[in-house]
Amino acid sequence: MKKIIIGVMGPGNSATSLDLKNAYQLGQLIAQNGWTLLTGGRNLGVMEAASQGAKSAQGLTLGILPGSNSSGMSEAVDIAIFTNLGNARNMINILSSDIVIGCGMGAGTASEIALAIKEHKTVILLNQNPDSQVFFQSLSPDQVYRVETPTEAIETVIDCLSSQS
């Protein structure tokens, strides 16, 4: 049986302390639900925090890395996919995720959310930027959800997974 893969996308260097706190809790909750966490695999920002959170709850972590080796990779990544694609790996992140959670916002995150919308993926936005929330939800109101907390994000994942069955 295929494992559910939840992608957590968010900023690296520009992640806020709230983004990091939310990402860590998302990683924990994803692991506690028995799902696999997918991130960009790097050792910074939301990617690192979510992976560390999942590992703290004995979860399985998958990192889709931009380079051709483990340089800059999070130690909390169990399975590393080296793409040597740079930012083009964003499409792999999206296509490999059953549901995408945007935790925080930056240019890379915005590109991943846009790709997810184009690929008809469910997107959950957990960020404090109302402009980005309104914009992305206006592009696809039926597949983009806005939430305030990691717990609400996971409840939304559960609801969406049950409606997909």
Image: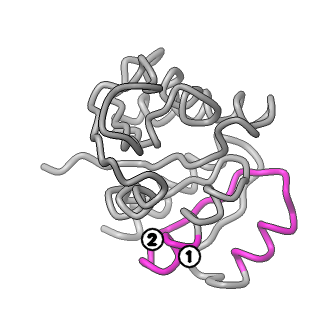
**Residue 152, how many percent across, how many down?**
66, 48
For the point 72% across and 54% down, which residue is it? 106
Between 113 and 73, the residue placed more toward the observer is: 73
Magenta span contains residue 135: yes
Q: Secondary structure at mark 2?
A: loop
Between 122 and 67, the residue placed more toward the observer is: 67
**Which amino acid type is marked by label 2?**
Lys
Q: Secondary structure at mark 1?
A: loop
The residue that disc 1 covers is 143
**Residue 94, how many percent across, how many down?**
42, 61
Residue 32: image quadrant is top left
Quadrant in which the C terminus is drawn: bottom left
**Image position of 37 with respect to 126: above or below:** above
For the point 46% across and 42% down, which residue is it? 40
Q: On residue 121, which mark appears? A: 2
Category of crowding for the residue at label 1, using alpha-carbon neighbours closer than 10 angstroms: few (below 14), some (14–19), many (at least 20):
some
Magenta span contains residue 122: yes
Residue 102: image quadrant is bottom right
For the point 47% across and 26% down, which residue is it? 72
**Image position of 90 with respect to 154: above or below:** below
Which of the two labelled residues, at mark 1 and mark 2, occupies the earlier sequence position?
Answer: 2
Bounds of the magenta segment: 114-137
